[in-house]
Amino acid sequence: MKASICNNRGAVYVGIIFILLTVLLLSTSLLNMSIDSMGMVINSNNDSYRANYIIESILELKIEEIMELFDGAIRNYMADLQTYKVEHSEDIDGFSYGLPDFYSYIRGLDSDITGLSESAKNPFGEYKEKHYYKVDIKCDWDKKRVNITSRGEYKQARKFINVELELPTVTNEGEDENGLPKIAILPARITRYYQTYGL
């Protein structure tokens, strides 16, 4: 009888050891899977940050180029406005003063602004993985704004950003000493800058 009791205790200990080993095996497997998935999430976030950097840096350059085009049009308009005012002050009786239309100067930039649209594959040499960006620029003259839709990719991560620029606006600030309107021009400004889930 004593031999059978000893064998039962040994069988219980072996069973407990197998159950503990199984629990240990399952817990290490789950721990390993969670660490691997955490690594994938971290890599995915890094890719997302890189895609965001790509598109934001390109957008910054494009917005700066558009602002430079607007500045050139404003300088041309102000020079022509000054010429009109000088001609008006020299010959008040025979000169019919017609204020130049500012928005015709801005509309003349349509092909230059839309020509800034572009796309490129692997533009950044320091990024070894596949990356890409696309910027599409359209002018909406009725609403007096420029719409920019953009997309940046790095590996499998994609970021989409839309921007709306309000065109420069002309304001009348009274009259000068010759009775001609004083013109002030408010520069273009970003009215909306937001991230979307697709184009």
Image (spheres, rainbow, N blue to C red):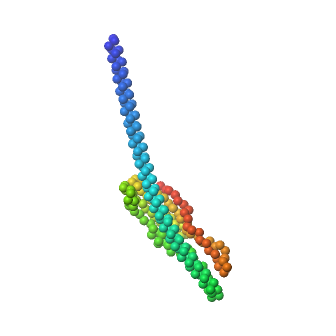
- Residue drawn at the location 67% of the way across and 74% of the way down: 174
Give the x, y percent position of residue 87.
Answer: 60, 84
Please give left or right for residue 142 compared with residue 54 in the image: right
- Residue drawn at the location 32% of the way across and 13% of the way down: 3
The image quarter in which residue 159 lies: bottom left
From the viewer's side, name the closer residue of 182 and 167.
182
Give the x, y percent position of residue 122.
Answer: 38, 60
Q: Which quadrant is home to the N terminus?
A: top left
Residue at the bottom extreme, as displayed: 94
Q: How many marks?
A: 0
Residue 186 seen in this snapshot:
yes
- Residue drawn at the location 45% of the way across and 63% of the way down: 135
Residue at the top extreme, as displayed: 1
Give the x, y percent position of residue 191.
Answer: 56, 62
Residue at the front extreme, as displayed: 126
Give the x, y percent position of residue 26.
Answer: 38, 34
- Residue drawn at the location 38% of the way across and 28% of the way down: 20
Residue 104 seen in this snapshot:
no
